[in-house]
Amino acid sequence: MKFKSTTPMTQILDALFKVYEARVPDVRKITQAMIEKGMVEDQTDIVNDHVAFRTLGVPNLGIASFEKIFLAHDYSRKDFYHFESKKLDAHWYAPPTDDLPRVFISELKVDLLSEPTQHIIKKHVSQITSDPVDALDLNDVNAVAEFFQTPLWSLPSMTDYENLLAESEYAAWVIYNRYYLNHYTISVHDLPEKFNVLESFNGFLKSIGIKLNDSGGEIKTSQDKLLRQSSSVANQVQATFAEGATRKIAGSYVEFAERSVLPEFCDLSQKLIQRKHRREGFETSNADRIFESTFTSQLKK
């Protein structure tokens, strides 16, 4: 995700990306193959459509806390989304300039879960008695970057993790992975012509051994047909639990987005098309399936 410009927000995102690409081998694998195919010269040539984070909807955490980081750097809160079956809410945030990615923040509606599952989550987060973001200097790049990697609650036991996994795979992911970057997104429509549609780009991904999330089909399409998305299956990480037990669990993944030009701008020359001329925002049905990139049903494929 590395940026050519240097602002506090680009520095924060770049620091996040360094940790993310180290934990997700598919990131470097995809980038290197794109370079070899001549799609890009280096990572900075890849346009990042959006980044996504997962949070827990409990006091002092969740979207209300997490969004402060981005609002402080002139992002604007946009549409609200609700995912009934997964018991999630989300907002997306528009960046102040086109060189920055959109941000998608979701939160688990913990109070809608069963009492035993709520108990596990609240046991871990009960030690958080004030909003941790309020204690940050949001203009301090190092402090904010470090915050994303700082444990806010203790490691779960393997039993707690597996009990969460049985009811909410999202809950299990957050309780162990915390605020790690969930995914970044390659803007496929900004690639050279041979690869700028998802069918051809997905073919390229599969040719280099990337497993794709096939929940709802490999390509998830919005109702207006103007937003199409695919994603890799999450790379697994070796997790060490509170008691020292270990097992592989879902880490993070990579997403791929194709945003079509809006009908009213279809007559524009390709050279004149900018981000504002393409389909904006997100689609609940697409995102609902993209969430499953970290689910056991996909990891087992």
Image (cartoon, rainbow, N blue to C red):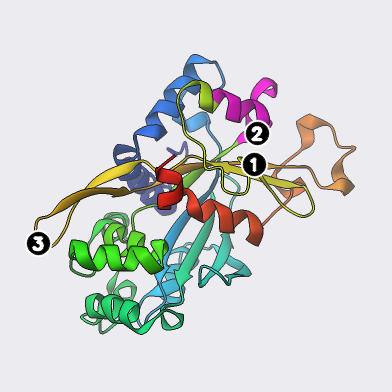
Residue type, mark 3 in image: Glu
| Label placed on residue 219 | 1
Residue, disc 3: 243
- Label 2 and label 3: CA atoms lie apart by 44 Å
Which stretch is magenta?
A: 188-204
Tell me the quarter of the picture where residue 124 sits.
bottom left
| 225 with respect to 266 (left or right) | left
Q: Do the residues under discs 3 and 1 have CB atoms within 8 angstroms?
A: no
Tell me the quarter of the picture where residue 300 sits.
top left
Q: Upstream in the sequence, badge 2 or badge 3? A: 2
Depicted 41 relative to depicted 127: above or below: above
Q: Do the residues under discs 2 and 1 have CB atoms within 8 angstroms?
A: yes
- Label 2 and label 1: CA atoms lie apart by 7 Å
Depicted 117 relative to depicted 7: above or below: below
Residue, disc 2: 198
Question: Label 2 crowding class (10 Å Cα cut-off): few <14, some 14-19, many 20+?
Answer: many
Considering the numbered disc 1 on the image, is that residue within a helix, a strand or a loop? Answer: loop
Instruction: Name the residue: 52% across, 27% down.
Output: 205
